[in-house]
Amino acid sequence: MMDTIFALATPPGRGAIAVIRMSGPDTNRALDALGAGRPTPRLATLKALSHQGDRIDQALVLRFVGPQSYTGEDSAELHLHGGRAIVEAATAALIAIGIRPAEPGEFTRRAFQNGRMDLAQAEAVADLIDAETQAQAHQALGQLAGALSATYAGFRRDLLQALALVEAEIDFPDEDVPDHLASNAGPILDRLLGDLDRALADGQRGERVRDGYRIVLIGETNAGKSSLFNALVEREAAIVTPVAGTTRDVLDAQLVIGGYAVTLSDTAGLRPTDDPVEAEGVRRAQVRAAEAELRLWVRAPGDPEGAAADHAQPGDLVILSKADRGLAASVEGFESLAVSPLTGQGLSQLHDWIAARLARDLAGSDFPAVTRERHRRRLSEARDAVAAARSALSVGPEMAGDDLRRAAQALARVTGAIDVEDVLGEVFSTFCIGK
């Protein structure tokens, strides 16, 4: 039998209300010990809470009867006044009663173990708590509602259909079944391979919505990168001086543009240098530029194409910076936009351009099949196994069976249908206490 657990479900510190959650077989006993009795399930009831004669608070108590609760167990919520002393008194009383503090993610882990949600939905709970943009919240809500799980279930359903055809020919060779039954699995696997390839080639859309889209400013020294950075983040985050090479390290800022999370990075000017400190800054700028989804190539009047040309990629935007002093030369093959952080020229157009780019790269009618690296690894395993099975069909159905089972197991691990103990710690360790 599981222990009964509790946790503060609201942020710690002074507040109007503090909510303590409980879950487990001794929930009703704990309510009795606090003087709350056993209120009608799902009906908020005002109760005077006390322990061993000491009054704790006048609180609203909500009781949930398993399995119709978040965790699938008997559970309750104590809606207390948010003073620290009251929360500490309630916490001390629960511990004295024998209820233990929950570990990170333990409530949601119990919900998974009790069949209230699958592993992908449990991950969505953490993503929804961490969501800071509309796009992140929309993606997490869709995943919590089962959209991602349905996608993987469809993949696995095709796999099991193909596996059934293969195993029917293996197990019943002398029975009255159609000849070459396993060959009928070929078109199913071809279609599934296409679906898996599209999922893996989605440009990491789901992960970028969740973790943030990376935009990096690159260019020569004194091209105006730091001034543009400050203008976009709307504060003096980067030091701006006339001295070439002022920026020596990568400076990051978190933005929300068009409803999407963005990490904007200011970097050192790209030029050869004998200064070891500046050289390290240039190296870091080059690495960050290679990792980014979008580079804004900042060019001031008179700038040569220089080293930045080696790091710009098709689809990047050239920023003709310091437009109040004249226009830098455009670069063939790249779209350009004139901007002056000093006068504000072009900043709204730049913001709109980035928002349109984010919508193009991250929006989509299809639900992202990959929202975490863990999913991507399992999809890759499944794709490789399906490809191996497809090739093995021409040799013999018995050669394809093991590969198809391996693919089905890889997909099942995403939702936690089988063999999940090795990933539970990874998933739930990222949760906050009380969830």
Image (spheres, grey):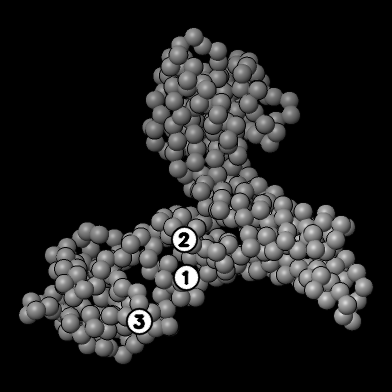
Tag 2 and tag 1, C-beta contact below 8 Å: yes
In-front residue for pair 5/268 = 5
Q: Secondary structure at mark 3?
A: loop
**What residue do we see at 58% from left, 62% from top?**
413
Tag 1 and tag 3, C-beta contact below 8 Å: no
Residue bearing the label numbered 1? 112
Amino acid marked by disc 2: Leu
Vertical placement of 28 versus 306: above or below? below
Name the disc covering residue 79, or none: none
Q: Secondary structure at mark 1?
A: helix
Q: Mark 2 or 3 closer to N-term?
A: 3
Give the CA distance from mark 2 to mark 1: 10 Å
What is the quadrant of residue 39 in the picture? bottom left
Which of the two marks, 2 or 3, is nearer to us in this view?
Answer: 2
Q: Residues within 10 Å of mark 2 (few under 14, many from 20)?
A: some
Residue bearing the label numbered 3? 74
Amino acid marked by disc 1: Phe
- Is 317 situated left or right of 431 in this image? right
In-front residue for pair 369/401 = 401
